[in-house]
Amino acid sequence: MLRIENLHVSIEEEGTRILRGVNLEVNAGEVHAIMGPNGSGKSTLAAVLAGKAGYDITDGTVEYFGKDLLEMNPDERARDGLFLAFQYPVELPGVSMSNFLRQAVNRVREYRGQDELSAVDFLKLMKERAALINLDPSLIKRSVNEGFSGGEKKRNEIFQLAMLEPRLAILDETDSGLDIDAMRTVSDGVNKLRSEERAFIIITHYQRLLEYVIPDFVHVLVDGVIVRSGDKSLALELEAQGYDWLKKELAESAS
Amino acid sequence: MSNSSTKYLQEVANSEYEYGFVSEIESERAPAGINEDIVRFISSKKDEPQWLLDWRLKALKQWESLNEKEAYPRWAHLKYPKIDYQSICYYAAPKQRPALNSLDEVDPEIINTFNRLGIPIEEQKRLSGIAVDVVMDSVSVTTTFKKELAQHGVIFCSFSDAVKEHPELVRKYLGSVVPYTDNFFATLNSAVFSDGSFCYIPPGVRCPMELSTYFRINEAGTGQFERTLIIADEGSHVSYLEGCTAPSRDENQLHAAVVEIIAHKNAEVKYSTIQNWYPGNAEGVGGIYNFVTKRGICLEDHAKISWTQLETGAAITWKYPSVILKGDYSIGEFYSVAFTKGHQQADTGTKMIHMGKGTRSTIISKGISGGFSQNSYRGLVKIQPRADNARNFSQCDSMLLGDRCGAHTFPYLEINNSSAKVEHEATTSKVGEDQIFYCQQRGLSEQDAIKLIVNGFCREILAQLPMEFAVEAQKLLAIELESSVG
Amino acid sequence: MPEGNISKTTVSLEDRILTRHAAFMANLNGSQPFLLGLRSNALQAFQSLGFPGRKSEDWKYTPVTKWLDASLQMAESHDEPVLAVPPVLKQDNRYLAVSVNGIFRADLSELPGAEQNVVVCSLADAFKDHTELVQSHIAKQADYTSEAFTALNTAFLGNGLFVWIPDGASLDYPLYVTDICTDPNRSLIQPRNLFVVGANATGTILEWYDGPGHPSCFENAVTEFYVGPSSRVNHIYVFDRGESADLINSLFVYQEKDSYFATNHLTLSGRLVRYNLNFLPDGEGCETHLLGLVLARNEMHVDVHTFVDHAKPNSISNELYKCILDGNSVGVFNGKIMVRQDAQLINAYQSNRSVLLSDSAHMYSKPELEIYADDVKCSHGATTGQLDEEAIFYLQSRGLRQEEARLLLLESFAREVIEQVDDEAIRAYLGVRLRELLGEPAVSSTT
């Protein structure tokens, strides 16, 4: 599904190098967790995959279902089933959730060669998916993310994921700022959305979320490189010993 | 923002005007120029009583002295060449003035015109229950629903009919909110106004339908000077709608209207405007000069006047729908969206004059500028010494859709009572890149994202419009945005 | 021709100004042609502008001719004994530049030593010793062709203060600048200051004008700052000359790229006080901060005009002006932010917060935005109201008397500005002075 090879990324104009040769392969049905300390490049990786402006790809390739992902516009990627749950979802004042999502759903359906949903079917789908992740139905009547609490915003991201049914979902620190109950609801939602056809990349700082959403693979990103990959036990090890342990070990092996 | 979005945002300047056709209607017009003879001519054409002619002549005298001193307002953030008032024709009327209540007698071309404007008079008459007064080149051509309204005691007719049929009301209220000395353009209007709409809601009556006036400038070389007078008697309620269009012409045409609203005790008037005069072409040639004085007075306690406007047309807009809050606990509101593109210039806003105790006002203004346009909010909030516990909240947001346009905010806050609470906030920004990206990440194209965000920016204003109008407003805004961003 | 409604008395003031100017010019033997030309051009400009009338939009709420009364004299040079330097300025670790009636006096000053590499002298000396530098900066920002008071000041330009912090230099201690008015008559004094700060230089300047002897002068001051690339200037301005002193103060700040200029502007007393504060960040990466506090009581009339003109991209400006109005006082705030075309990536904020303490106090606020570039974030806000009744009640319920509660709230309102004053001794003094002023019951003619 997704093959990242030797990806080098720096910040446009500034030139600061963030990613220094990331390699990653993700197949349908898999759940990958990417962990790493602050500033390791986790969120940059998510942003680059979604096509955010402001980054220079200085080297490497990203293949998505055989296509060159980096050549695609952000909206093309979204229509082709790549979904990013934002760490900080922006507010769209005055833009109603239903209007926004209806356009989004229909653009994605159009791309897949499906008919537009009728207003009735769309509302039905909204209700159903909102229930799936326990989203307060009153939020659907409001403007996108406007005046939402931190937890509501995160839940809203997962709700949109459920609505758009992507092939690859990237969750960028969806767990940050969530209390334990919200975390449980969000992970329940994610677990319900796991399927043979769908892959997840879960970006997180802590191991906490991975107790609820069990990953198939765990990768540790440090200073823009994946320094270690393993299964879910790697996350526990990190939790127990901290990132310093890994950094130290790396430094030792380098010397 | 990416190059493609910058590019299509720049296309804001090049949008086409949809209503730029000319109707072939025979008309009767006065020779160009303004003088006592012309004023007498207009007055006699309308069979006006002596008092009204006298009033016009006083206004003319005042205007002539203002014109001599070149005392037209200069403070607005507008640039336009000097207007030659002697080259304008001050009276043009469709030749066959139809009898009222009988649409069949209306020149079919007029009906045609309004159908092309998307104002299906016939249909509305039957279906939607909106009473429409149609004013073409300053002359009222048809008013619908007159009979049904009359059953409720509501008077809704052309201004000239009101002068004949309800002279006592006209005489009592004409000029009581906007005196003929008020300002250069209002004074000009007072001298030469040819027609307009008149509306009276008797005590305790809730007007059973929306009242609507459509203004159309059709003739070349003319100005339009209509006058609207709305009186809401004690405890009454009315919602009034106004729409405007004009043909595309290379010349600039002057529109100098006056609207006066009087709200008595516990009365409520909601006045909504969709202004879509011809804005001139992409190079800034032609277009309507829209110099309009609109003012309401909450004469007694607990009255409420609310202005909502969607301003998308006219080469120049100079317009400040205002409320004088004289009665205690009266309420004034101003909701505005002004969208300028091409070479349009708008200087618009409001005045809230707090005189009574416990008076409250709300101002929400959204300016969107694109192309080479200049878009200014100008507003006055004045708290008089006796207005104890007055409250005002103002929010003025501007959005820029290009790097060759301007967005400006000029609020005046004059507070002369220490118990007043006045809050003003303004912001200026462009459409957020992170907002566009968020929408794109959900599959929307960049163009659709911008349209969605701009629409959202205006939503709280459009939500103030009556249902039938809101749909039209959204359509209009969509057309404007379409040509701007798609 | 002078515009507006100039009364007979002020016309005669203008006559006196002209006569005086002729004498002034005749006495300037040996002055440079540059200076002579500047003065006579400025006088011509003043004559054609005249004192602003009420129709002038910039003076809409301040009919200035009301204060330009018949008793106003052109200041003569005086030999009266100089009153003591304000005690608060007697601090360790500071330099002091003293002027008397607008004329710099090295003999009363305590200036940086030669090792500081900083020049502090009279403008007259500077014209001789630093001719090119002064000529390239004087009257460059302070445009005398469009503003009458700047023109009037420029017409008599001569013996003001000149401060030069050359490239790479930095003042180790703050420079206190003060002017002592000794004229017992009601006289027009016209201080003129030029501060030239080179590249990569830093300094803190405190301007302090209080009123020993409660002068009834009419002060028309013009100050120009040139802030070179990557330089940092902290500026503090305090006006507290008492209830019979009038002031027109025009400040012009020109900023080169990557420079930083911050000013704290405090007005504690006066009769007519009018500020024209102009900032022109004319390079990328500039930072401009303007904090102001006005405390107006009795018959005081304070009119603050500020103008931040973003001419170049990538800069930040932040403005907060607070007013407390009591008695019959009148406050005017007219703040304008301009972002010129192509000055992208500007963040500009402006806020005006006013508290009215009396029913006969008035506040006129006019915050303006004029934006010609699209990639900007600009905002302004203005609020006018009274002290929060609920907060007063809350404090009362905790045992404070109403007056104490009121004072506490006013102090905290003012503190936001005062606590940013970057000089501990001055900050402490201001705290005490503020309490004194707020605690003093205001005299209101209506009560």
Image (tube, coloured by chain):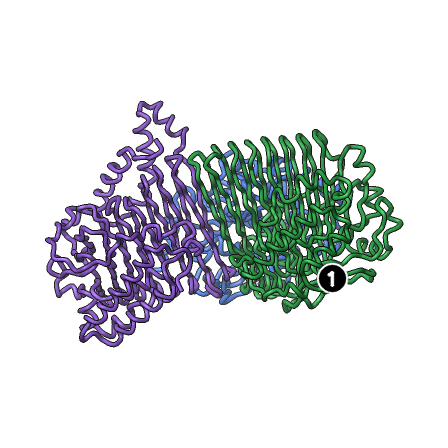
Q: Provide residue A188's location: percent of width, then percent of height.
A: 59, 37
Asked whether residue C131 appears in the rendered view, the answer is: yes
Chain identifier, blue in the render? A
Q: Indicate the colour of chain C.
A: purple
Answer above or below: position of B98 versus A3: above
Answer above or below: position of B183 versus B153: below
Q: Which residue is at 31% across, 23% downward?
A: C399
Residue kind at label 1, given as amino acid type = Pro
Q: Chain of mark 1?
A: B
Q: Residues within 10 Å of mark 1 (few under 14, many from 20)?
A: many
- Residue A1: name its quadrant: bottom right
Q: Provide residue B129's location: percent of width, then percent of height.
A: 79, 40
Does C429 sit left or right of B201 as displayed?
Answer: left
> In which quadrant of the rendered image does the C terminus of chain A lie?
bottom left
Does A121 sit left or right of C177 as displayed?
Answer: right
Answer above or below: position of A242 versus C17: above
- Residue B145: name its quadrant: top right
Q: Which residue is mark 1?
A: B247
Asked whether residue A71 appears in the rendered view, the answer is: no
Does B168 sit left or right of B78 as displayed?
Answer: right
Mark 1 lies on a secondary structure that is loop
In the image as oriented, which residue stretches furthest toward the right? B104
Chain identifier, green in the render? B
Front in this rendered view, residue C304 or B219: B219
Front in this rendered view, residue C200 or C18: C18
Q: Provide residue B410's location: percent of width, then percent of height.
A: 49, 52
